[in-house]
Image: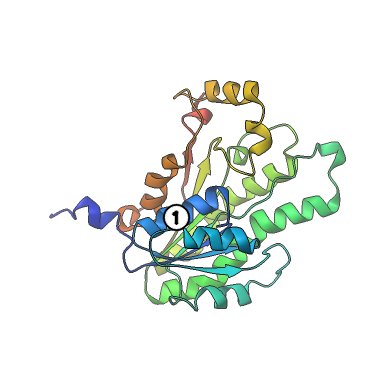
């Protein structure tokens, strides 16, 4: 059997990707990584200035769609909009998320509802609206963002952890539902990366160092660490991988 060259295995040339949360953090990094790999990328976020800054400063073909996913209960309009610039997406990256960091004693129903809506419900319903287009071509990739808190309990993280635990199981259920139609569904579970969402953590030098020491590698993550795993899950290199959660955490969960 002749093996495909690695540059073809990991290439995203000719693919269209939709990335939510593309204005900052891991979403922005993901959108940039896919554009650099040759995909035409539509970034989705609510903060227009930051979203356009990403698009204008990223090499490759990019477009933006401004939407507040938390308030858009029906993802149909978003799905239609992201298909306009380059055609129906082949790849969906569900990176938008929120972490309110409230103790269990103080969680309000509104906080709980918003967290589960943005972190769990929106990824499912947006995928549901896009999967038929992928299946029509018998090729698609859905990558959700799970978390260390999909399996670990952290202080002040009950609503976030509940949502991310749900993301892990949802990813398996998505794979069961859609993989036979050519749409592979996996998740990345990042360790601690310096982002807007983790800003409060990285503002504490002692806590940052303690987290680094918790990993097997001895450091926290950088955006460069995301590139290989993401390209793998979005490309033909992962043609026989579905329903999996890949922890990109420097071995945090191994200890």
Nearest the eye: 193 or 58: 58
Q: Secondary structure at mark 1?
A: helix
Q: Tell whether 103 sits left or right of 250.
A: right
Give the residue drawn at x 41%, y 77%: 136
Task: Write down the quadrant of residue 40 in the picture.
Answer: bottom left
Q: How many marks?
A: 1
Give the residue drawn at x 83%, y 44%: 107
Q: Position of residue 183 (x, y in %)?
A: 43, 65
- 171 to 197, vertically: above or below: below
Q: Residues within 10 Å of mark 1 (few under 14, many from 20)?
A: many
Give the residue drawn at x 60%, y 51%: 167
Q: Pick the quarter of the image with the N terminus.
A: bottom left
Q: Position of residue 58 (x, y in %)?
A: 44, 58
Is residue 153 visible from the viewing direction of this image? no
Nearest the eye: 69 or 3: 69
Is residue 74 visible from the viewing direction of this image? yes
Q: Where is mark 1, residue-wise?
A: 32
Q: Position of residue 163 (x, y in %)?
A: 67, 49
Nearest the eye: 216 or 163: 216
Q: Position of residue 226 (x, y in %)?
A: 44, 44
Q: Residue furthest left?
A: 2
């Amino acid at each position: 059997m002749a093996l495909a060259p690695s540059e073809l295995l990991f290439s995203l040339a000719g693919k269209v990707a939709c990335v939510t949360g593309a204005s900052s953090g891991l979403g922005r990094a993901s959108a940039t990584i896919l554009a650099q790999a040759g995909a035409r990328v539509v970034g989705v976020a609510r903060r227009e200035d930051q979203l356009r800054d990403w698009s204008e400063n990223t090499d490759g073909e990019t477009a933006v769609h401004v939407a507040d996913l938390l308030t858009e209960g029906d993802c149909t309009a978003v799905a239609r909009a992201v298909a306009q610039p380059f055609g129906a997406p082949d790849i969906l990256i569900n990176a938008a998320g929120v972490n309110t960091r409230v103790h269990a004693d103080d969680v309000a129903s509104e906080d709980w509802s918003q967290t589960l809506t943005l972190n769990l419900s929106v990824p499912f319903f947006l995928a549901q609206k896009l999967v038929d287009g992928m299946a029509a071509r018998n090729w698609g990739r859905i990558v959700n963002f799970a978390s260390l808190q999909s399996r670990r309990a952290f202080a002040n993280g009950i609503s976030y952890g509940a949502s991310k635990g749900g993301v892990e199981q949802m990813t398996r259920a998505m794979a069961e539902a859609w993989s036979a139609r050519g749409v592979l569904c996996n998740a990345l579970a990042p360790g601690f990366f310096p982002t807007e969402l983790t800003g409060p953590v990285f503002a504490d030098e002692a806590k940052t160092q303690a987290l680094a020491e918790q990993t097997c590698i001895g450091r926290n993550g950088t955006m460069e660490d995301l590139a290989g795993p993401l390209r793998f899950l979005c490309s033909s290199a992962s043609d026989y991988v579905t329903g999996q959660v890949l922890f990109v955490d420097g071995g945090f969960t191994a200890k």
